[in-house]
Image: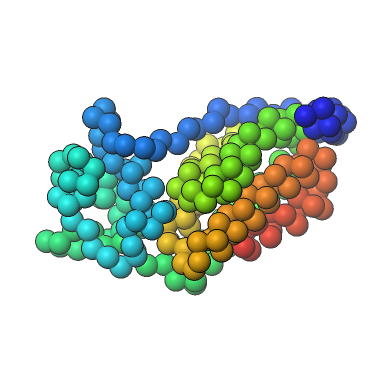
C-alpha cells in the first residue's frame, strides 16, 4: 500500500485533476418483493451470463415466474427489456429464445467497444492524476476476486463496474451509457469448454485490469496503449 501511495504521489505531478464517479453497485441474489421487475431482470441477466439459460433454448414467462417465485408479468417485462438489449428474441405463443452469438458478432462488438474506449482511455491517461486511478484499485481487485472464484455473473458485474468507473472520469455520461450497453451485450454468450479453462480466461482478463491501473498510475502511455488494445483483442 505504501508503494502504491508513493507511485501515486510521484506520478501526480505529471497529471491533472479529475473526478471519480461513485461506484454503481450490482444487485444479485434472490428476488425481493420490492422492485420485482428489476430484481427479476438482474436474476435473468445473471442466469444468462452463468449459462443457466442456454443459447437457442426457449423459456416461457410462467415457467420462469415459478422459478423465481413471482408472477409471469414481471418476467415478461424483464424479458422484453432483454429483447431490446439483444439477449433474447420473442417467440410468439411460446416465450423467449436466448440469442446465439457467433465469433463474428462478438468480434464486431469488441471492435466497436475498442473504437469508443481506446481513444478515451489514452486521452484520460494524459490528464488524470495518479491518485484518481489508484482510487479505482478496489474495483479492479473485485474482478480478480470474482475471477478466482470462477463466479461468472459476479465477474460480469465487477468487470462492467470497473470499465464504467474508468470511462466515468471523462465526464461524458452518454459515452459511459453507450459503452456499458455494448459491454453488457458482449457478456451474454455462454462460454463453452472446461470449467478450469473458463476460469483461467477470467483470471487473465482480471489481471489486465490491475496491470492497466499500474500503467495509468505511472503515466506509462506506451504500456496503457498496448494493454487497452490487447484487452479488446481478447474480448
What is the quadrant of residue 75 in the picture?
A: top left
- Frontmost residue, 127 versus 233: 233
Q: Residue at x 49, y 72 (%)?
A: 104
Q: Position of residue 105 (x, y in %)?
A: 47, 68
Position of residue 149 in the picture relative to residue 68 (left or right)? right
Q: Position of residue 63 (x, y in %)?
A: 17, 52
- Residue 65 in view (yes/no): yes
Residue 108 against residue 64 in the figure, above or below: below
Quadrant of the drawing holding the N terminus: top right
- Residue 119 in view (yes/no): no
Q: How many marks?
A: 0
Residue 231 against residue 16 in the figure, above or below: below
Q: Position of residue 162 (x, y in %)?
A: 58, 41
Q: Residue furthest left?
A: 93
- Frontmost residue, 196 versus 156: 196
Q: Position of residue 230 (x, y in %)?
A: 69, 60
Q: How is the image coloured?
A: rainbow
Q: Residue at x 73, y 47 (%)?
A: 211
Q: Residue at x 83, y 46 (%)?
A: 220
Quadrant of the drawing holding the C terminus: bottom right
Q: Residue at x 52, y 51 (%)?
A: 150
What is the quadrant of residue 72 in the picture?
A: top left
Position of residue 127 in the picture relative to residue 170 (left or right)? right
Amino acid at each position: 500500500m505504501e508503494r502504491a501511495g508513493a507511485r501515486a504521489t510521484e506520478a501526480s505531478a505529471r497529471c491533472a485533476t479529475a473526478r471519480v464517479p461513485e461506484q454503481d453497485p450490482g444487485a444479485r441474489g434472490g428476488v425481493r418483493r420490492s422492485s420485482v421487475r428489476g430484481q427479476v431482470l438482474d436474476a435473468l441477466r445473471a442466469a444468462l451470463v452463468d449459462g443457466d439459460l442456454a443459447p437457442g433454448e426457449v423459456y416461457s414467462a410462467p415457467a420462469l415466474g415459478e422459478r423465481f417465485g413471482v408472477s409471469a408479468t414481471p418476467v415478461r417485462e424483464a424479458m422484453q427489456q432483454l429483447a431490446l438489449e439483444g439477449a433474447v428474441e420473442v417467440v410468439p405463443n411460446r416465450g423467449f429464445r436466448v440469442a446465439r452469438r457467433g465469433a463474428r458478432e462478438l468480434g464486431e462488438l469488441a471492435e466497436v467497444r475498442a473504437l469508443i474506449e481506446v481513444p478515451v482511455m489514452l486521452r484520460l491517461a494524459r490528464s488524470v492524476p495518479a491518485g484518481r486511478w489508484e482510487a479505482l484499485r478496489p474495483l479492479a481487485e473485485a474482478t480478480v476476486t470474482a475471477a478466482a472464484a470462477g463466479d461468472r455473473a459476479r465477474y460480469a458485474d465487477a468487470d462492467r463496474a470497473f470499465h464504467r468507473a474508468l470511462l466515468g472520469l471523462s465526464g461524458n455520461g452518454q459515452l459511459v451509457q453507450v459503452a456499458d450497453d455494448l459491454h453488457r451485450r458482449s457478456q451474454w454468450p455462454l462460454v463453452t469448454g472446461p470449467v478450469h479453462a473458463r476460469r483461467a480466461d477470467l483470471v487473465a482478463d482480471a489481471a489486465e485490469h490491475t496491470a492497466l491501473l499500474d500503467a495509468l498510475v505511472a503515466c506509462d502511455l506506451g504500456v496503457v496503449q498496448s494493454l487497452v488494445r490487447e484487452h479488446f483483442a481478447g474480448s
